[in-house]
Amino acid sequence: MKLGHVALDGTKIKANASKHKAMSYERMEKRAAELEAEVERWLSAAEAADAEEDRAFGRDKSGEELPKWVADKKKRVEKIRAAKAELEAEAKAAAAAKAKAQAEERRQAEGRKKPGRPAAPPSEEPDPKAQKNFTDPESRIMKTKDGFIQGYNAQAAVDATAQVIVAHGLDAKQSDQHQLAPMADAIEANLGKKPTQLSADAGYCSDANLTAMEEREIDAYIAPGRAKHAGEGEGGGARVAAMRERIKAGGRSSPYRLRKQLPEPVFGQIKQARGFRQFLLRGVEKVANEWGLVCLAHNILKLAQGRTPSLAALATG
């Protein structure tokens, strides 16, 4: 298989969990307190009833096991408390990573005058809207063109020659931006060679990603962000501005046009033709393996179709 142009894209796929089984960080504390108060009321009522029964029937007629409906409520509280602790740990880890990045930016900016106020230190408190799902805690609420789903973000790098998936990945993050360099490295790890060209949409574009493609000597065509001027938001930076001009100058003949022609039909074949719209397994590691099997099945079918002679060829042969 020739490895000339490769296009990268991501698609959101439902997890084996309902989004209605998720709870926000803000709601967790309130709900846990409500359940604990409810269990306490029941236990107090049970103790009062026990005391009344002891007076009426004697102390030897008692059962000490918790009723199932009380045990279920206590288990629910434990799950909520555990999910809340996980969100807090994730927020602290994210804050530490952001603080490290800010420190590196300050170190690089020493001696250069920078306008504006210094960035505020990152918060270690979770976003009140951050959510955890109790069925599959590693899945996340994902925004799609059809609304919100509880799911995962599946990645595929598709080659331009045979529409074969040459690398795949999966995680539970809404953004695609962090996936560009790992996917490019996965292509080389899988096939022993780098793609000559790589295209991707604006979700993958940043100065850091374009630098990574330059370092790997990959001719990248990645749509810039929507910022009007270099330096603004996600679309800013000298490399992003240069990429904007490069794609604009190429017009309809730019290799960037392949970005839609390659991955989107593959996702359509997987979801529409084969009906794969929801994972069966749970947990990011198991789901990533399941996505790998789906990609493998796609490749086997593609290769089989390429080797099977058409009816027209058989009729004229």
Image (cartoon, grey):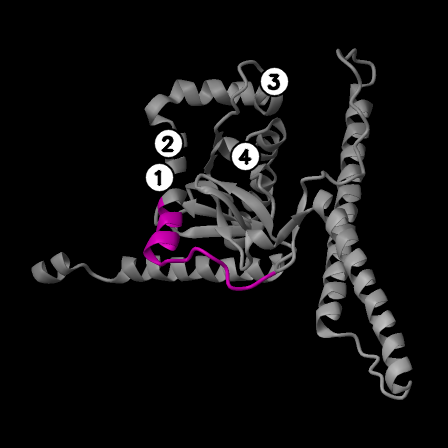
Q: Where is residue 254, by image quadrant?
A: top left
Q: Nearer the viewer, mark 3 or mark 1?
A: 3
Q: Earlier in the sequence, mark 1 or mark 4?
A: 4
Tell me, yes or no, whether the two marked residues, 3 and 1, touch with CB atoms within 8 Å.
no
Q: Hey, what amino acid is under mark 3?
A: Glu
Magenta residues?
265-282
Q: In percent of the image, x 55 and y 50: which residue is there?
A: 152
Residue 298 in percent (x, y) is at 39, 58
Q: Hey, what amino acid is under mark 2?
A: Arg
State the separation of the CA atoms marked 4 and 2.
16 Å
Residue 86 in percent (x, y) is at 75, 52
Q: Where is residue 113, by image quadrant?
A: top right
- Where is mark 2, residue-wise? 257
Q: Is residue 297 left or right of residue 91?
A: left
Q: Earlier in the sequence, mark 3 or mark 1?
A: 3
SS at circle 1: helix
Q: Nearer the viewer, mark 2 or mark 3?
A: 3
Tell me, yes or no, whether the two marked residues, 2 and 1, touch with CB atoms within 8 Å.
yes
SS at circle 3: loop
Where is 159 relative to 71, above or below? above
Q: Hey, what amino acid is under mark 4?
A: Tyr
- Where is mark 1, residue-wise? 261
Q: Is residue 211 left or right of residue 297?
A: right
- Residue 232's disc is 3
Q: Where is residue 295, by image quadrant?
A: bottom left
State the separation of the CA atoms marked 3 and 1.
30 Å
- Where is mark 4, residue-wise? 204
Q: In percent of the image, x 61 and y 30: which residue is there?
A: 211
State the separation of the CA atoms marked 2 and 3.
25 Å
